[in-house]
Amino acid sequence: MVHNNYSPDLVQTQRDWTRTCQALAHARAGHNTALRRRLLGLSRRLVQDVPRAEQAALRRRAQEPS
């Protein structure tokens, strides 16, 4: 399988985004502000550093075992 050369910190950012999104889905109403802010920050980083055409490939790469 061919992998794009994503930096380890970018792959970790994608993993953090996925975990934060899952935590937000299970958070109680009224106790999710910090999670929403974290998700926005992570999203901003991913959008700035990864071209749209490569975002799906990064998500797949982040799901692979380390």
Image (spheres, rainbow, N blue to C red):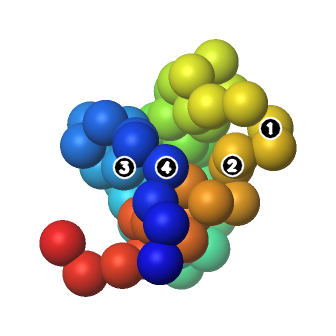
Q: Which residue is mark 4?
A: 4
Q: Amino acid at mark 2?
A: Gln
Disc 1 and disc 4: Cα gap in Å?
Answer: 14 Å
The image's mark for residue 18 is none
Q: Position of residue 21 (x, y in %)?
A: 56, 62
Label located before the other in sequence (2 or 4): 4
Q: Quadrant of the C terminus?
A: bottom left
Q: Which residue is mark 3?
A: 11
Disc 1 and disc 2: Cα gap in Å?
Answer: 5 Å
Q: Are marks 2 and 4 in contact (CB under 8 Å)?
A: no
Disc 3 and disc 4: Cα gap in Å?
Answer: 11 Å
Q: Nearer the viewer, residue 51 or 42?
A: 51
Disc 3 and disc 2: Cα gap in Å?
Answer: 11 Å
Q: Are marks 1 and 2 in contact (CB under 8 Å)?
A: yes
Q: Position of residue 46 (x, y in %)?
A: 58, 33
Residue 13 visible, this angle? no
